[in-house]
Image (cartoon, rainbow, N blue to C red):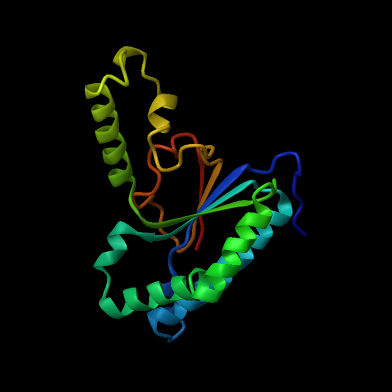
Amino acid sequence: QLIMDKDNIPEHVEIIMDGNGRWAKSHGLERWEGHKKGVDAVRTAMEAAGEIGVKYLTLYAFSIENWNRPKKEIDVLMGLMVDAILPEEVYNKLQGLIARTASNTGLTLVLALSYGARWEILTAAKRIAQDVRDGKIEDVEAFTDADFSAYLTTSGIPDPDLLIRTSGECRLSNFLLWQLAYTELYFLD
């Protein structure tokens, strides 16, 4: 039986969803079939996070580097994402849901799609340089890490407390490198 300390629930959990293709291969299936199973895992993770009181759940679903995969696999991954979140009737329902839940205080889901931390940090640095050039930042010496964080794509979202990576890989894969500075890391098979 799992015993949970309800006073010690992470506010922000991130999951690098990895290993679906390898799981499929190890079970004699095509890689894309593993990705389809991954959609079920996403639903389970979202429901569990919401039930225990996690405030933010970030899912690293597709990295910039994933564009280098075989075309058939990318097509399947994009199709799964579209089926899961973007068909017109789902999109319309989603817009209504967003409006109805705008004042809710429960789980906030963040999807990292076509994301890369080096791209994010470089983009932030360029924006900062432009703001210095434009005189919007006058005292560079007074510029803090909180000021820098405001230029990131995760501005307004707390840094993660816990990162979970599936698949047995023990690396960050260019994911939220700035934000993970003090995050607990958990790698599982």
Residue at the spot 29% in from the left edge and 29% down from the top edge: 128
Q: Residue 69 versus residue 135: which sits nearer the camera?
A: 135
Residue 131 percent coordinates (x, y): 28, 26
Q: Is 135 above or below relative to 162?
A: above
Quadrant in which residue 73 is drawn? bottom left
Q: Is residue 136 visible?
A: yes
Q: Residue 107 versus residue 27: which sits nearer the camera?
A: 107
Q: Is 141 above or below relative to 127?
A: above
Q: Is residue 39 left or right of residue 75?
A: right
How many numbered callouts? 0
Q: Residue 16 versus residue 77: which sits nearer the camera?
A: 77
* Rendered-image quadrant of the N terminus: bottom right
Residue at the spot 34% in from the left edge and 77% down from the top edge: 75
Q: Is 2 above or below relative to 162?
A: below
Residue 164 percent coordinates (x, y): 52, 53
Q: Is 22 above or below relative to 131?
A: below
Q: Residue 116 versus residue 167: which sits nearer the camera?
A: 116
Q: Is residue 49 visible?
A: no
Q: Residue furthest bottom?
A: 28
Residue 125 percent coordinates (x, y): 27, 33
Residue at the spot 64% in from the left edge and 61% down from the top edge: 97
Residue 160 percent coordinates (x, y): 53, 41
Q: Is residue 84 left or right of residue 121?
A: right
